[in-house]
Amino acid sequence: MTGKREQTKKDNRNAILEAAREVFVKLGYGATTVRDIIRATELASGTFYNYFKSKDEVFQAIQDENALRVRPRLRAERVRARNVEEFISGSFHTFFEYIATDRRTFAVIRRNADTMRVRMDTPEIIAGFDELRIDLLTAIEQGIFPPVDADYLMASLVGVAFEIGEHMLTREPIDTKAAANFATALFMGGFKALPHYVAATEAAA
C-alpha cells in the first residue's frame, strides 16, 4: 500500500507539471491561474494544493526539473574539455541537443521569457550557474582559458545559448550542429571569423 501511495503521489505531481507546461505555453505565465492548471488535469482542486501552493511554485518546479536533466551532461562536457574550443563547442552542442529533444519545456521558458528573467533564483538553476562559473574559473586557472572575467563570460555563454537555441527550434529541420558551430565560431573568433570557421567545420563533418 505504501508503494502504491507513493506512486500515486508521483503520478499526481507529474500530471500537474505536464498540465502546467501546456497552459504556460498557451496562455503565458502572467495570464495563467491555478484554476487553469487544475482544469487541464483530472485532479480535484484540493489535490493540487497538496503539492503546490501557487502557480509560481509550479513554474519553479518546471525550471528545476529542466535544470536537473541537463546539468550533468553539460558538466561532463566542460570537465573533459582540453582547450577553449572543446569547452565552448561541447557546451553549446550539448545544450542544443537537449532542447531539441525537449522542445516543450524550452517553449515554457521562452514563452515566459519576461517572467523567467526574474525567476532565475530557483535552487537548481542557481546550482547550474555556480557550476558553470566554477568550471570557467578552473579552466582559467589551468590555462585552458585566458585570464578573463568569468562572470561576464558566463553571462555571454548563457545568453547566446538561449537566444540561438530559440531561433534554432523555429527551423526545419532542426540542425543542432549548425547552431553549435555558429555559436562556437562567434566566441572563438568574433564576427569576422564566422564564415571561415563554419565552412571549415562543415567541411570536416
Image (cartoon, rainbow, N blue to C red):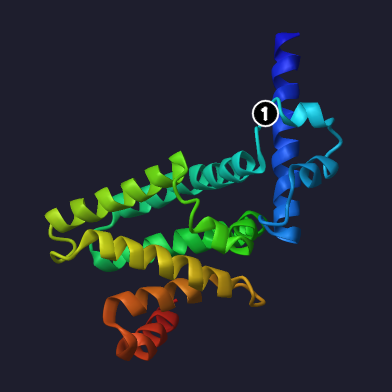
Residue drawn at 56 percent across, 63 percent down: 113
Asked if residue 202 lies left or right of residue 132, the reply is right
The local secondary structure at tag 1 comes to loop
Instruction: Locate residue 92: give its quadrant.
Output: bottom left
How many labels sit on residues? 1
- From the image, tell me which residue sits under label 1: 51
Q: Quadrant of the N terminus?
A: top right
Q: Quadrant of the C terminus?
A: bottom left
Q: Is residue 177 visible?
A: no
- Residue type marked 1: Tyr
Q: Position of residue 174 (x, y in %)?
A: 61, 72
Q: Residues within 10 Å of mark 1 (few under 14, many from 20)?
A: some
Q: Position of residue 51 (x, y in %)?
A: 67, 28
Instruction: Locate residue 87: give its quadrant.
Output: bottom left
Q: Position of residue 169 (x, y in %)?
A: 61, 70
Compared to residue 86, the image places residue 19 above or below, namely above
Q: Is residue 79 visible?
A: yes
Which is nearer the eye, 192 or 17?
17
Residue drawn at 53 percent across, 56 percent down: 116
Which is nearer the eye, 37 or 205?
37
Q: Position of residue 94 (x, y in %)?
A: 46, 59
